[in-house]
Image (tube, rainbow, N blue to C red):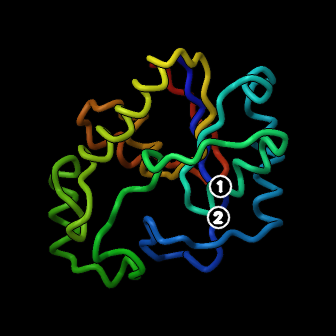
């Protein structure tokens, strides 16, 4: 199975913020711009035939809807961003340094802000992907978040360097399962 992971457009007013699962809106023109670039990056058959799935947060759901306006995308909580617990809605610079350091030392096991560890989030993603494969999906387009994409790209290797990959807004990443 091939999964094309698509990152949502840039949310309005979220620069410098740990927004995680907060439903931060995206300007319509920003979504339209990302739709054009994503369509150019995805193979034509993926756009025409693939199951399109999305995180239920509006920044992803809006993009999924615009990508395939003639059919409904499946909203799935397994594609939600990591839960950053008490860090959500805070400026990154306001997160205590000791907590950021603890996360950096063990990103797979540490649950930032008391939320969700990378290991738990990866297992959530993996259960979703394996379920789709078992259902017979050949190709899936998944509109999701940078954290989920990083975890999928790291493929559970527990290599912390994979968790720091740059995942630009509107980017497309191909994963084989």
Tell me what residue is drawn at x 55 percent, y 76 percent. 14
Q: Relative to residue 177, is residue 61 drawn left or right?
A: right
Report whether 93 appears left or right of 166: left
Q: Using the image, determine if residue 15 lies above or below residue 78.
A: below
Quarter of the image holding residue 123?
Answer: top left
Q: Position of residue 21 (x, y in %)?
A: 44, 65
Mark 2: which secondary structure?
Answer: loop
Q: Using a 10 Å C-alpha cutoff, classify the residue at mark 1 as few (fewer than 14 neighbours), some (14 to 19) or many (20 or more).
A: many
Camera-side residue of 65 and 42: 65
Q: Which mark is residue 118?
A: none
Of residues 36 and 25, the one drawn nearer to the viewer in this rendering = 25
Side (left or right) of 163 relative to 173? left
Q: Residue at x 70, y 48 (%)?
A: 64
Which mark lies nearer to you, 2 or 1? 1
User: What residue is at 16 percent from the left and 50 percent from the top?
Assistant: 109
Instruction: Give the vertical position of 74 relative to 83 (above or below).
Output: above
Q: Position of residue 139 (x, y in %)?
A: 61, 21
Residue 34 percent coordinates (x, y): 76, 52
Residue identified by numbered label 1: 61
When the figure is inspected, residue 92 is found, relative to residue 20, above or below; the finding is below
Q: Secondary structure at mark 1?
A: helix
Q: Which residue is mark 2?
A: 10
């Amino acid at each position: 199975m091939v999964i094309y992971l698509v990152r949502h457009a840039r949310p309005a007013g979220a620069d410098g913020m740990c927004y995680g699962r907060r439903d931060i809106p995206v300007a319509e023109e920003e979504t339209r711009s990302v739709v054009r670039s994503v369509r150019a990056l995805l193979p034509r058959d993926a756009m025409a035939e693939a199951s399109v799935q999305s995180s239920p947060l509006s920044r992803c759901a809006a993009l999924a809807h615009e990508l395939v306006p003639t059919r409904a995308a499946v909203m799935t909580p397994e594609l939600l961003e990591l839960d950053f617990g008490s860090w959500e809605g805070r400026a990154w610079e306001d997160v205590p340094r000791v907590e950021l350091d603890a996360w950096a030392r063990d990103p797979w096991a540490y649950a930032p802000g008391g939320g969700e560890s990378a290991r738990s989030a990866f297992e959530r993603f993996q259960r979703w992907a394996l379920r789709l494969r078992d259902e017979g999906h050949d190709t899936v387009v998944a509109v999701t978040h940078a954290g989920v994409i990083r975890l999928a790209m790291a493929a559970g290797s527990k290599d912390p360097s994979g968790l720091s990959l740059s995942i630009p807004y509107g980017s497309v990443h191909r994963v084989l399962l």
